[in-house]
Amino acid sequence: AVEETLKTQGLDPSPVSYMGCLLLSLEADRKEPELCAAVLTLLERAMRHVPPSLLMAKSSKIANVLVTLTNAHADSAAVLRPMLLCAKLLILAHPARGSLNADTQKLLRWILEFALHSLPKVRQRGQAIVIDLLQESPQHASTLSPTVARFVEAHLSKLSLKDAQAALYLLHLLKQALPLLPASSASSVTQGLLRLPSLGHPLLSRSAFELLFAVVADADTSINAATLSSVVESLLLRASESDSASKKKAGSG
């Protein structure tokens, strides 16, 4: 159908032409999840071969199509997974050096929300894309990390016991993401992690301390000395409390 449309309009079957035609298709018909998923998969393949400068120029329009599809198929993993791959390509089209523009920051924050999604397959894809973006190059990590760090810090600062499941999803993301963040971002995120045990959730506290221990044990960590000192103090306090509880239990026995 796409090739017929291109022939009718007298367009060459180039990646740019395919991308434009597929976007029009998505704008015209958004009802069937299976059809949308198939078109999004083709769109992502076409976008891989479109020059980054052109993707940047069309990013606002493409992002609007993706967001609209997400709103229409919020519970469809089949649609959301290829949609996230398209969004990833829009982020990578941004120059590796320099600060993110407002639209790209917004798109990255939108992708980050999917890293905490309730659907496992969508959450896995969202987290994998965040890690891929940070691993793309040191330049990309430096450019993207402030937005990632602010997202994580915002979630950590407002967590309560009712948000324990989302916090566990976030900790799972940080197991891979934290070592990829530059020093300033990694240090600020780690400071946020130190607050989690105060919620008094056993599994959340254990997961947080496991991640903090990994931070201390990493010989190549980029985290500053002051933050590392706070982590060590927190771990020592945890060990002391655990030892006291064990002795108390043994004494009562």
Image (cartoon, helix red, strand yellow):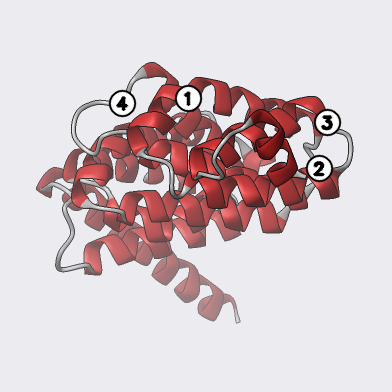
Q: Residue at x 19, y 44 (%)?
A: 139
Q: Is residue 124 left or right of residue 197?
A: right
Q: Position of residue 161 (x, y in %)?
A: 64, 40
Judge the density around disc 4: few (<14), some (14-19), many (≥20) Cα neighbours within 10 Å.
Answer: some
Mark 4: secondary structure: loop
Dots 4, 1 in contact, CB < 8 A: no
Work out which quarter of the rendered image holds the N terminus and state it.
top right
The first of marks 4 and 1 along the sequence is 1
Q: How many marks?
A: 4
- Spatial distance from mark 1 to mark 2, Cα to Cα? 27 Å
Mark 3: secondary structure: loop
Label placed on residue 112: none
Mark 2: secondary structure: loop
The first of marks 4 and 3 along the sequence is 3
Q: Residue at x 44, y 20 (%)?
A: 103
The first of marks 1 and 2 along the sequence is 1
Dots 4, 3 in contact, CB < 8 A: no
Q: Is residue 241 left or right of residue 6?
A: left
Circle nearer the viewer, 1 or 2: 1
Circle nearer the viewer, 4 or 3: 3
Instruction: Say which residue label 1 marks.
Output: 58
- Spatial distance from mark 4 to mark 3, Cα to Cα? 32 Å
Circle nearer the viewer, 4 or 1: 1
Judge the density around disc 3: few (<14), some (14-19), many (≥20) Cα neighbours within 10 Å.
Answer: few
Residue 166 in view (yes/no):
no
Instruction: Say which residue label 4 marks.
Output: 100
Instruction: Say which residue label 2 marks.
Output: 75
Disc 4 residue type (three-letter)? Leu
Disc 1 residue type (three-letter)? Lys
Mark 1: secondary structure: helix
Instruction: Say which residue label 3 marks.
Output: 29
Residue 50 in view (yes/no):
yes
